[in-house]
Amino acid sequence: MNGRREEEGGWIRQLRSLALKELDSKLDLCEANNENDRMVIEKCASDMERVRSEDGVPALIDYLIKKASQDANVPAAVLLNTFIANSGVSLADQAKVVLPGLLNLYTSTNTQIVDHSIGATAALIQSMGQKEMITVLPVMNSTIDQMVATAGGKGQHIPGFKHSNGLTPLITIIQNTITAKKKEISGMAIETLKLVVELAEISTLENVFRAATIPLIQVYRDDLSVNDKSKILKSMGIIFSKLIQTSHVSNPFLLPHIESMFFKALQDQSSSVRLAGGSAFVRLMKFHPKPEATMTELLRLATSEDQNLIESSLATARALFAARPDEMSDVTFEEILFLTEEIYAKPVADPSEIDNSLTFCSGALLGEMVMQKRDWRTMFYVISPEPRRRQAMGYVLQFCSMKADVIWSSDLGEKFLEAHEKALTSNDPIVVLCALRAASFILQKTIDTDFLSAVVRYMKHENSDVRQMTAISLGHFLYERDVPVDLLKGVVPQLIKGTSDRNHAVRKSSQLALIHGLKLTENRIRYDEYRTAVDLIEQGHLDEIRVNMSSRISARNVALEPLDTITTVD
């Protein structure tokens, strides 16, 4: 501390009055640097009054914040909290200057300073009306953004956000700004709330659950922008994912209002709003007391004339089934069978993008149900002459393949393999794509040499979508498994050829598969092992593409592409 005071040009040299200097000297005498050193703190009281008279309240507050922040002086934080709470001086008109300093004390590594900064922040906000809170929100938003950036983008490193009372004053500002329903500022309030709940600990969210959610329920309406609706729904989803299995989210008063809001979101014109609503809905359903009743309503919505509503309802129903399969009765199973059959059995001469999506979503829902129920017989109908049924069954096969290890060990193992072979050799590219995704799931569970060879051959398929999906499927398999060099010899050459494919997407997917197959994101051990095991010609091909692979790795552009792009909520 003394060394800090001696720094040339340090802030302490800029103290203007004798009163401030005397106050500073007394605070430095507190060797214990503890909130319980009442003697030092009481001695400072008279000096604080002198500072207040000579320099004014803003100078006093600024000094105490800097002393607590830059010198980590606990008595300064105690005096700051006490003054704001008990002096009778309203700082509401100075909140835009004072609040950033108080929030920055949230980052202190001293728990006592954090405690008193939160107390001071709460006292400041208690002195403010709604108008002042609306005015200070932009400053609060930018301050929190800066705090997170300084903490390396990880708000969990900010002690004040982990404190049980740390969010309460911030939520008060956000709540009052949202309920003011001023379009020009409510969007920022919603964004700030989303940021705050992302950073919050479970214990801190529990204390502000009602204060955070009620304004969002109140403000959610049709005339909000798509961006604001999505932020509200994502904020709710984050809250539910953090507060899973707590009594707060099952509040019988709030639950019907929350459900109503989510059902409204599912019927929105915007796809992003529908999916955000579905995602939040499923997170809520993970601890909902009656998930089957919600499933029934989702299946009812899926009989609508609105194809977009059908799509979002099917995707949400699938995610709900995955989250709570044991809560679904045989009656619900039959309803799903009937509903999905109604969709994919209806012929469409020239299917649009949404028609195809409904086929895939219905097949995916059926596949989820079949997989959870483990009634595998349904997946064997991938050779139907009806295109939509055939494609839907392709998705059933794909989803069932996620449980490939279970099916292999059942008495249907041979039929499962037969169904997969039929799907791979189908003349329908959509079915082949499903089979290739299924192959990736199977290979991730069990490496079969013949099966792997059969999949690799599709790198030569005439359809570029099929070639790309082959590379993507192999990429996921190679990422998950540590494949022996002998097996890599049957895979890597075809992927190398894929990196020079005439189709850009195939080239990209092939390169990613090679990077993960040779474990180049980790080190060069597997690459060198493979290189020494192949002939000079193959080594030359490998060396040619290594430069591009190294560039991609250096740019950290190595994330695997998703196996599927089906409409999904998570």
Image (spheres, helix red, strand yellow):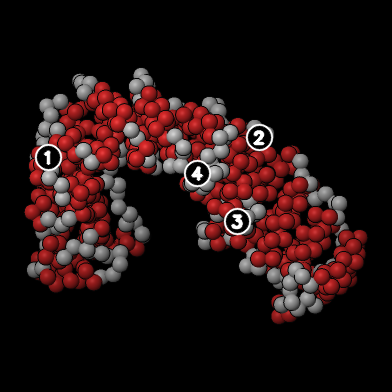
Q: Position of residue 49 (x, y in %)?
A: 90, 62
- Name the amino acid type tagged 3: Phe
Q: Earlier in the sequence, mark 2 or mark 3?
A: 3
Q: Which residue is mark 4?
A: 240
In the image, taking residue 372 as reference, residue 210 lies left or right, namely right
CB atoms at circles 2 and 4 under 8 Å apart? no
Residue most extreme to the front: 330
- Name the amino acid type tagged 1: Ala
Q: Which residue is mark 3?
A: 161
Which label lies toward us, 3 or 4? 4
Mark 2, Cα crowd under 10 Å, few <14 / some 14-19 / many 20+, is some
CB atoms at circles 3 and 4 under 8 Å apart? no
In the image, taking residue 100 as reference, residue 377 lies left or right, namely left
**Number of the label disc, if any, that sits on residue 179:** 2
In the depicted structure, whether residue 170 falls above or below residue 60: above
For mark 3, give the secondary structure: helix
Q: Earlier in the sequence, mark 1 or mark 2?
A: 2
